[in-house]
């Protein structure tokens, strides 16, 4: 999940509104990408977080495990260098897919050196990269509350106007 509040707009990239990708190293590099292709504002976001393992080895702490109880199993830091970019997407008829709108991004490589980053659980002993794959009917069931809320907003406003 990648969520951003920017300029009064909430951007939420989750597997049930589009596609998520991630690549997380054992320590020092996190790359997350999300595309939201449902709703009124399709967008794409990329978030990277990096730290030098020699300069910032992170803090190892205990976490619960299924078989061994609380063991030193996670590592985190609040001193990672992070960068986020956010682009508006538009529908391209020729390719029948969403593409980035021409022009500058909504957020162009915003940076912070106070990023929180963590690895833990598993499989953090190797680089972990995946692409989300949420299939129907689960995807439709998870989207149901969002659709109901949009329906309420759309028809609730009409009903309130007609009662005025």
Image: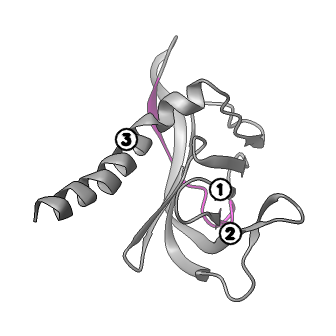
Q: Nearer the viewer, mark 3 or mark 1?
A: 3
In this rendering, the count of numbered labels is: 3
Q: Are marks 2 and 1 in contact (CB under 8 Å)?
A: no
Label 2 crowd bin: few (<14), some (14–19), many (20+), radius 10 Å: many
Colouring method of the image:
one colour
- Residue placed under numbered mark 1 in the picture: 34
Q: CA distance from mark 3 to mark 1?
A: 23 Å
For the C terminus, the image quarter is bottom left
Residue 42 location (% of width, % of height): 61, 63
Q: CA distance from mark 2 to mark 1?
A: 12 Å
Residue 39 location (% of width, % of height): 53, 56
Q: Earlier in the sequence, mark 2 or mark 1?
A: 1
Question: Residue at (80%, 58%) from the top-left corner?
Answer: 97
Q: Are marks 3 and 1 in contact (CB under 8 Å)?
A: no
Asked whether 136 or 54 is in front, the reply is 136
Given the current orientation, which residue lies at the most extreme bottom position? 103
Q: Secondary structure at mark 3?
A: helix
Within the magenta stretch, is there residue 51?
Answer: yes
Within the magenta stretch, is there residue 21?
Answer: no
The answer to whether 6 is drawn above or below residue 128 in the figure is below
Q: Quadrant of residue 122?
A: top right
- Residue placed under numbered mark 3 in the picture: 148
Q: Earlier in the sequence, mark 2 or mark 3?
A: 2
Q: CA distance from mark 2 to mark 3?
A: 24 Å
Q: Secondary structure at mark 2?
A: strand
Asked whether 95 or 14 is in front, the reply is 95
Which numbered disc covers residue 89? 2
Residue 146 location (% of width, % of height): 42, 44
Label 1 crowd bin: few (<14), some (14–19), many (20+), radius 10 Å: many
Q: Earlier in the sequence, mark 3 or mark 1?
A: 1
Given the current orientation, which residue lies at the most extreme right position? 94
Q: Which residues are magenta?
A: 47-64
């Amino acid at each position: 999940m990648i969520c951003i509040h920017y300029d009064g707009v909430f951007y939420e990239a989750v597997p049930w509104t589009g596609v998520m990708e991630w690549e997380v190293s054992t320590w020092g590099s996190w790359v997350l990408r999300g595309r939201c292709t449902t709703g009124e504002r399709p967008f794409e976001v990329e978030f990277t977080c990096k730290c030098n393992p020699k300069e910032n080895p992170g803090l190892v702490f205990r976490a619960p495990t299924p078989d061994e109880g609380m063991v030193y199993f996670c590592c985190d830091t609040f001193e990672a260098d992070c960068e986020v970019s956010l682009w508006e997407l538009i529908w391209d008829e020729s390719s029948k897919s969403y593409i980035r709108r021409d022009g500058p991004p909504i957020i162009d490589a915003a940076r912070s050196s106070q990023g929180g980053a963590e690895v833990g659980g598993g499989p953090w002993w190797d680089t972990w990269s995946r692409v989300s794959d949420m299939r129907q009917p689960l995807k439709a069931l998870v989207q149901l509350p969002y659709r109901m809320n949009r329906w309420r907003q759309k028809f609730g406003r009409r009903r309130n106007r007609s009662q005025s």
